[in-house]
Image: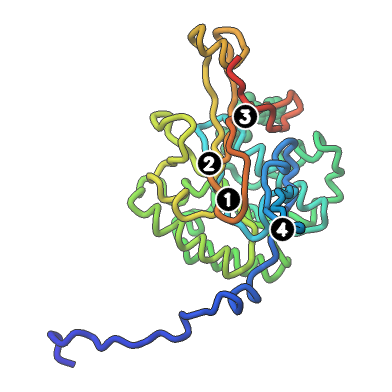
Amino acid sequence: MDKDTPQKSRVVEEGIWVVGEALKKAPQLRGIPTGVEGLDELFFHAEIEGEKVIKKPLGGIPAYSVVNITGVSDTGKSLMVEQYAVKQAQRGERVAFITVESPAPFVSLGLKERANAMGVKFSQIENNIVLIDAASHSSLRDSIPNLLNTLAFAIKEYKVSHTIIDSITGLYEAKEMMARSVVRQVFNFMKKWYQTALLVSQKRSGHEELSAEAAGGYAVSHIVDCTMVLAKELIMTKTASQIYGKPVGEVVRLFRIDGCRLCGHDTKTRFLEIADTGLVKVGEPVSGG
Ligand SMILES: Nc1ncnc2c1ncn2[C@@H]1O[C@H](COP(=O)(O)OP(=O)(O)O)[C@@H](O)[C@H]1O
Ligand SMILES: [Mg+2]
């Protein structure tokens, strides 16, 4: 073909759906309990009953969603995804846990701790969580094709239906212009394999605390279905002390669902608590007085 001739366009018929046909292929909207107290009640869907539209709780995050959990360090992101993993394993579901920062043996310790605190016997979950150690293997960390092939293998081999990546930011460290491409590939993979996925992303402390912007810009939150923001704030003024009802000098942890495309959700900024046992829970809304 003459290189100056524009490529002939064609009709991509397979890209056209009548919405009724598309819905037949859609998964049912249902909630997956997260193992995080106070979180499951924050997602809703609307139902028509007679003449009225009513808001029904979903009882967890939407199944088959890709959820971004973002925050600066020490906000409780890892605890949250560990609790989720333990909860799914306890329910008899299989989880792939891709660890990018902490080597697998350390993560297994954390999972055991979380299980103990949740009153779940480790023997009940030990065969239901598969760790993929990208922290120790740069061949996984530095190659998205290797990582996704390995994950596909684990999903088939162990019948995995939930995938956790802690953290996705670790997959594009020092090459943040790659963030969008990495997140897009991971997102498409999760959809193709019908995974309910939690992606942890790190915020730099310079980013506004409760915004969804993660390292790599807005790549993560723009692509995923749902974003939750975890924050911590040092109370330094009387006003802040009044708003949070805590003394000056104390640290408060905060939680907000920034958005969820698949269902309705709570939009308030809430307290996030970390118990001495190492369990996070979502608390009451910040009321301001
Ligand atoms: N086993 C535990 N017991 C009590 N507190 C814990 C435990 N593990 C972690 N924490 C507290 O929770 C905080 C958040 O932990 P983590 O989930 O690892 O943060 P992130 O992944 O957001 O960096 C820690 O800084 C610590 O204060
Ligand atoms: Mg962490």
The quadrant of the picture showing ligand 1 is top right
Whether residue 235 is situated above or below residue 19 in the rendered picture: above
Q: Nearer the viewer, residue 70 or 286?
A: 286
Task: Establish if 16 lies above or below 124.
Answer: below
The mark nearer the N terminus, 3 or 1, is 1
Q: Nearer the viewer, mark 4 or mark 1?
A: 4
Determine the residue positioned at 76% across, 52% down. 88
Measured in 3D between alpha carbons, the distance from the residue under mark 4 to the one under mark 2, in whole angstroms, is 26 Å
Q: To which residue does mark 3 refer?
A: 270
- Give the mark nearer the N terminus: 4 vs 2: 4
Q: Would you call the spot at circle 3 few (<14 residues within 10 Å), some (14-19), or many (20 or more)?
A: some
10 Å crowding of disc 4: few (<14), some (14-19), many (20+) = few
Q: Residue at x 63, y 70 (%)?
A: 26
| Amino acid type for the residue under numbered disc 4 | Ile
Q: Residue visible at 71% across and 58% down?
A: 48
Marks 2 and 3 sit apart, C-alpha to C-alpha, by: 12 Å
Residue 219 point in image, percent of width and height: 41, 50
The reply, left or right, for residue 84 in relation to residue 7 is right
Name which residue type carries label 2.
Asp
Tell me if 92 is positioned left or right of 210 in this view: right
* Residue bearing the label numbered 1: 67
Q: The N terminus is located in which quarter? A: bottom left
Task: Tell me the SS state at disc 4.
Answer: strand
With respect to residue 212, does 158 lie above or below? below
Report the residue that reaches farthest toward the bottom: 1
Query: Which residue is disc 4 drawn over?
Result: 48
Residues under labels 1 and 2: Cα distance?
A: 11 Å
**Mark 1 or 2, closer to the camera:** 2
